[in-house]
Amino acid sequence: MSEPMTHTGAHPGASEGATHEAWSPDGPIAPTRVSEVAVLDALKTVFDPEIPVDIYELGLIYAVEVEDDGAVKIDMTLTTPSCPSAQELPGQVEEAVRGVPNVTSAKVEIVWDPPWDPSRMSEDAKLALNMY
């Protein structure tokens, strides 16, 4: 069994490497693996209802693991343990990721260590929220 692809990083706004499509003389070959970039793009469609910035740019996503069988595990946090969106955000994240081609399952685990703080936000999120 090969190692799962894992995305972690201290800075959520860091750019991802380019992805390449498989190709044959007959044209592109449909991928059978889950695209990590597509998973990250799906995460960027989920917004905290109280903050006009997506959860990825806010720095709420701590880790994404994509297994060979298409299972995706996301470790995420919330801005505070008393976040009013605590009940709905994990389900929204799972739903968004399940919509990515070749994803067989999506599971979100809420983690509190390390605690979230504004330094985890991307530069774009800080600009959008006037936090300079």
Image: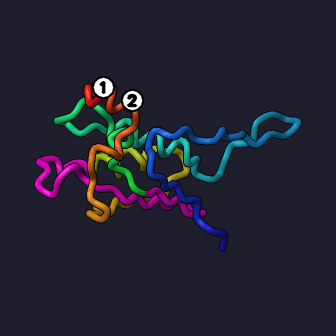
The image's mark for residue 75 is: none
> What is the span of residues highlighted in magenta in the rendered image?
63-90
Asked whether 103 or 123 is in front, the reply is: 123
Please, which residue is most extreme toward the right here? 25
In percent of the image, x 66 and y 74: which residue is there?
A: 1
Of residues 14 and 86, the one nearer the viewer is 14
Q: In percent of the image, x 40 and y 43: which residue is there?
A: 43
Q: Amino acid at mark 2?
A: Asp
Determine whether the residue tagged by mark 2 lies in a helix, strand or loop.
helix
| Quadrant of the frame with the C terminus | top left
The answer to whether residue 31 is above or below residue 112 is: above
- Mark 2 and mark 1 residues within 8 Å of each other at the beta carbon: yes
Farthest residue to the bottom: give it: 1
Query: Front-most of 75 and 124?
Result: 124
Which numbered marker is on residue 128?
1
Please identify the residue farthest to the front as the structure is shown: 132
The residue carrying pointer 2 sits among few (fewer than 14), some (14 to 19) or many (20 or more) residues within 10 Å by Cα, namely few
**On the picture, is 130 further left or further right than 38?**
left
Element type at marker 1?
helix
Q: Residues within 10 Å of mark 1 (few under 14, many from 20)?
A: few
Residue visible at 33% across and 56% down? 76
At label 1, which amino acid type do we have? Answer: Ala
Residue 104 highlighted magenta (yes or no): no
Q: Is residue 52 above or below residue 35?
A: above
Residue highlighted by disc 2: 124
In this rendering, position of residue 130 left or right of residue 103: left
Left or right side of 2 for 60 = left
Picture coordinates of residue 82 (x, y %)? 11, 55
